[in-house]
Amino acid sequence: MPHSGAYLGTPMRTITPAKVSLSSIDIAAVHQLRGCRLRPGSWPKRFARTIAEQVDAGNCLVTMKQLYWLWKLCYTFRRQIHGETLEEAIRRHTKPRAWVQGMLF
């Protein structure tokens, strides 16, 4: 009997990544990144919009990878970000091991 190409054995276990709660500076970074001028349809714009929608809905839990990319994008678009968020983005970019401890990719 032919099959549809789906996996026929036991299903593989999926590993759910651990989520962390966003701090107030992280939430400020989300809002400032949303206000940046980004190329339409690009991955950074979709990422910023998705994270901002999660925060607006009250879901302030993100994975460590999402947190890493949030600050990486804040540093990338640092000319459009100001204040305490900019200082934090520069600090996290220059000393990544200080806050990325235990992150698995």
Image (spheres, rainbow, N blue to C red):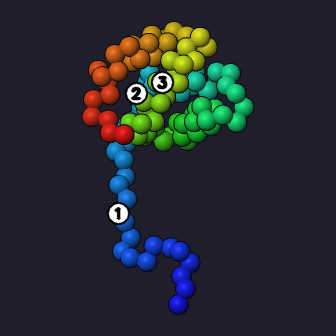
The answer, for residue 88, to whether it is visible in the render is no
Q: Earlier in the sequence, mark 2 or mark 1?
A: 1
Mark 3 belongs to which amino acid? Lys
Label 2 element class: loop
Residue found 58% across the figure and 21% down from its top: 32
The answer, for residue 38, to whether it is visible in the render is yes
Kindly identify which residue carries mark 2.
Answer: 23
Q: Nearer the viewer, residue 22 or 90?
A: 90
The crowding category of the residue bearing disc 3, from other C-alpha atoms within 10 Å (few below 14, some 14 to 19, many at least 20), is some
| Residue 27 position in % (x across, y down) | 49, 27
Mark 2 belongs to which amino acid? Ser
CA distance separating discs 2 and 1: 31 Å
Q: Nearer the viewer, mark 2 or mark 3?
A: 3
Mark 1 belongs to which amino acid? Arg
Quadrant of the image occupied by residue 35:
top right
Q: Earlier in the sequence, mark 2 or mark 3?
A: 2
Kindly identify which residue carries mark 3.
Answer: 72
CA distance separating discs 2 and 3: 16 Å
Residue 99 relative to residue 79: left or right: left
Residue 100 drawn above or below residue 94: below
| Residue 92 position in % (x across, y down) | 39, 18
Q: Nearer the viewer, residue 83 or 5?
A: 5
Residue found 42% across the figure and 30% down from its top: 68
Q: Nearer the viewer, mark 2 or mark 1?
A: 1
Label 3 element class: helix
Quadrant of the image occupied by residue 41:
top right
Kindly identify which residue carries mark 1.
Answer: 13
Q: Quadrant of the C terminus?
A: top left
| Residue 91 position in % (x across, y down) | 39, 13
Label 1 element class: loop
